[in-house]
Image (cartoon, grey):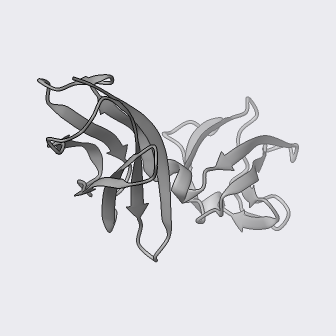
Amino acid sequence: MLAAGIRDSSGINITGETGHEIELRVDDEIFKVTELFSSRGDYRSGFLEVELPELEPGNHTIRLKAWDTFNNSAFAEVEVQVADLAESVLSQVLFYPNPWREQEEGFFTYVLTTPVESVRIRVFSLAGKLVDDIDGGRLAGFNQVQWDRPGNLANGSYLYRLQVAVEGGERFDLSAVIQVVK
C-alpha cells in the first residue's frame, strides 16, 4: 500500500487530462491514479492511497508524479527493497537458556511472520549424530517449543537446525549451537 499526501499552493490538477494525470510508476510500469486522489474541501491538498502490485524480491523504484493547476509537474521517488520470503518468514530464533543446565527447562523460541506448513527442529551432536527430532509451532507470531532433552545427553556443544517449509514447497533452515552443562 502506498499512502501519499500531495500539496501545492496553486492547487492540484485532478482533471485527468492526457499527460496531466496523477501517475504512479513502479519500476517500468505506469498506473494512472488520479481517480484515487481525495481532498477534504481544499483544492490545494489531498491524499492518495494506492494498492501496489505484488513485487518480486529485490530493489524497486516507486515514483509518484502530479501536476498543479498551472500545469507544472513535480514528483517524489523512493527506492525500496523487498525481502525474499525465506529471509522474512523466520526471525528471533533462540534457544533459552544457553548454556543449558540439567535442572532447567529448555525452550526453542522463534517468530514467524506468517503461518507455515511445517517447522522441524533437529538436534545433532558435533559428530553429526541425530540426538532429537521435534515438531515446532507453525502459527504466525511468537512460538515456544519446550525441549525434553534425552536423559543421556553429555556435557558439551550440540547443533540444532530449525527447518521451515512454506506454502509452495519452499524450504529453508537456520542452524545454531546449544551448550549443555550438567
Q: With respect to residue 16, does 72 lie above or below?
A: above
Q: For residue 8, which quarter of the picture?
A: top right
Position of residue 97 measured from the top left corner of the image (x, y, whole percent): 27, 24
Q: Nearer the viewer, residue 42 or 52?
A: 52
From the top left corner, tell me how far across and down residue 27 is, in percent.
79, 59
Q: Can you see residue 1? A: no
Lateral position of residue 34 relative to residue 10, left or right: left
Residue at the spot 32% in from the left edge and 68% down from the top edge = 117
x and y percent of residue 166 in the render? Answer: 41, 67
Q: Name the image quarter holding residue 3.
A: top right
Question: Going 41% across and 72% down the picture, which residue do you hit?
Answer: 167
Residue 164 % position (x, y) = 40, 60
Q: Nearer the viewer, residue 48 or 8?
A: 48
Q: Is residue 11 left or right of residue 129?
A: right
Quick check: 100 left or right of 114? left
Q: Is 173 in front, or is 160?
A: 160
Q: Is residue 3 left or right of residue 81?
A: left
Q: Residue at x 81, y 58 (%)?
A: 20
User: In the rendered image, which quarter contains the C terminus?
Assistant: top left
Instruction: Look at the picture and state if 26 lies above or below 103.
Output: below
